[in-house]
Image (cartoon, rainbow, N blue to C red):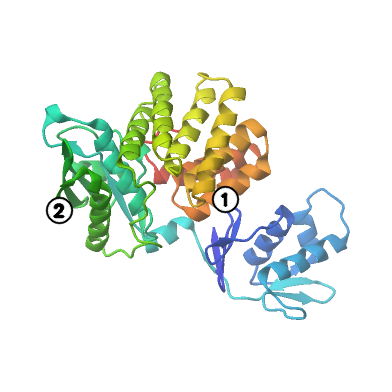
């Protein structure tokens, strides 16, 4: 459930308090106190009621509650003597007096977002097929379009199965449960690239936009930018912060190696995942500041122990180092935060750090299926079962057909 008041958003399923877009750190007890007061904002909550709820089966002094409420007032920005959010009813309890609007996460997405799937591009000529480039074009567009706060984009793990040369875009869109589908064809000849792109309404099959691009391969990033911007215009979307022009590398050589890494990793075979790490490492040699390549190394190394194809003591430290390096280059990579959380959870047994990283991932990308699934697994182990169910359902909703790793 989401509760909005003034410039705050309280997300009870993800256990996050946001001030605007910034996460506000709270201890578990203070967070639970806020949740209870907000959920019962229509009445006074007695001190005894709060003590039973926040400290169940534990005897604590009333002073603990007083300190929690005082700390909460400071976090919310109340100045000394001000009672803008929480009013003390002398001798009885507290009341949350700021107007509160409640909604579910699903309702919020429905109100503000459209859904889209980007299918792997097809070759113009079958014998010239380059599956890494075809999948990579979809992957890049998925990442760029996800920058818009008004759109939910199906992740690559959901769309990678739609690689048939005669793929029906409208049928794929219906299976994926989206409003529109972006697909197209791609061909590379020596140093040139030709891309045909089409945006289709999944409900009636009508074409919303088409475009053709014939450029030097060194301009592939510009082609991706142009397609993303024209799709956004066709869907009447506003661009996210920085638009769609964020570049993770300026090296087309490093980009091609990264595409090969993504392609082999997505095949889900241990030997192929191992090959992916080799391509990521080559990409990093060409561009030591390629954050996405480090993130790729992180998740590849995480997958080895899970599938019993590598020793945890060997693979998890490599994954952690790669995720930390990716975040040192670009802190805004939501999935890199999720990968770091998986290491904290499965290897370090550091639940608090895992939760912090997953919450950061969800602040950066609320539609990250990877982060929702990870959060669901974590809170299940912490016996927060209602949250676990909600997070798991949200992850499945965002990424149908995805194979969890």
Q: Residues within 10 Å of mark 1 (few under 14, many from 20)?
A: many
Q: Residue at x 86, y 62 (%)?
A: 62
Instruction: Give how far across and how far down residue 140 sits, in percent.
Output: 32, 45
Instruction: Give how far across and how far down residue 264 sits, in percent.
Output: 35, 27
Instruction: Give how far across and how far down residue 180 sits, in percent.
Output: 25, 52
Q: Is residue 8 above or below residue 392?
A: below
Q: Which residue is mark 2?
A: 211
Q: Residue at x 58, y 75 (%)?
A: 99
The quadrant where residue 324 appears: top right
- Observer-nearest of 329 and 145: 329
Q: Are marks 1 and 2 in contact (CB under 8 Å)?
A: no
Q: Quadrant of the N terminus?
A: bottom right
Q: Is residue 170 left or right of residue 267?
A: left
- Observer-nearest of 268 and 396: 268
Instruction: Give how far across and how far down residue 102 sits, in percent.
Output: 53, 65
Q: Residue furthest bottom?
A: 81
Q: Is residue 2 left or right of residue 347?
A: left
**Can you tell which of label 1 and label 2 is closer to the viewer?**
2
Q: Residue at x 44, y 56 (%)?
A: 106
Q: Residue furthest left?
A: 125
Q: Who comes first in sequence, dot 1 or dot 2?
A: 2
- Observer-nearest of 299 and 216: 216
Q: Which residue is mark 1?
A: 359
Label 1 sits on a secondary structure element that is helix
How far apart in space, not on screen, are marks 1 and 2 (Cα)?
38 Å
Whether residue 158 is visible here, answered yes or no, is no
């Amino acid at each position: 459930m989401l509760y909005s008041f003034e410039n705050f958003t309280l997300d009870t399923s993800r256990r996050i308090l946001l001030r605007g877009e910034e996460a506000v750190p709270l201890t578990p007890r203070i967070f639970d106190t806020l949740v209870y007061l907000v959920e019962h904002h229509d009445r006074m909550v007695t001190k005894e009621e709060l003590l039973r709820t926040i400290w169940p089966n534990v005897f604590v002094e009333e002073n603990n509650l007083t300190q929690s409420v005082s700390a909460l007032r400071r976090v919310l920005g109340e100045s000394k003597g001000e009672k803008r959010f929480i009013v003390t009813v002398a001798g009885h309890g507290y009341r949350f007096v700021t107007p509160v609007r409640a909604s579910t996460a699903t309702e919020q997405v429905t109100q503000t977002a459209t859904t889209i799937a980007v299918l792997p591009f097809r070759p113009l000529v079958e014998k010239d097929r380059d599956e890494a480039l075809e999948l990579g074009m979809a992957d890049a567009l998925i990442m760029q379009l996800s920058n818009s706060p008004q759109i939910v984009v199906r992740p690559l793990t959901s769309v990678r199965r739609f690689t048939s040369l005669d793929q029906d875009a409208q049928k794929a869109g219906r299976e994926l449960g989206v409003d529109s589908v972006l697909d197209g064809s791609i061909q590379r000849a020596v140093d040139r690239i030709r891309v045909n792109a089409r945006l289709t309404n999944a409900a009636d099959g009508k074409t919303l936009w088409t475009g053709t691009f014939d450029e030097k391969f060194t301009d592939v990033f510009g082609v991706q930018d142009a397609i993303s911007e024209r799709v956004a215009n066709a869907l009447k979307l506003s661009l996210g912060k920085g638009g769609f022009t964020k570049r993770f590398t300026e090296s087309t050589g490093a980009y091609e190696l990264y595409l090969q890494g993504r392609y082999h990793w997505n095949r889900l075979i241990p030997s192929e995942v191992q090959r992916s790490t080799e391509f990521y490492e080559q990409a990093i040699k060409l561009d030591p500041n390629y954050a996405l390549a480090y993130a790729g190394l992180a998740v590849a190394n995480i997958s080895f122990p899970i599938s019993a194809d590598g020793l945890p003591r060997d693979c998890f430290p490599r994954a952690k180092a790669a995720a930390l390096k990716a975040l040192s280059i670009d802190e805004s990579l939501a999935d890199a935060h999720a990968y770091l959380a998986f290491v904290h959870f499965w290897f370090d047994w550091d639940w608090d750090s895992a939760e912090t990283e997953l919450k950061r991932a969800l602040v950066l990308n609320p539609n990250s299926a990877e982060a929702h699934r990870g959060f669901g697994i974590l809170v299940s182990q912490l016996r927060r079962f209602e949250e676990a169910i909600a997070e798991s359902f949200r992850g499945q909703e965002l990424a149908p057909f995805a194979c969890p790793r």
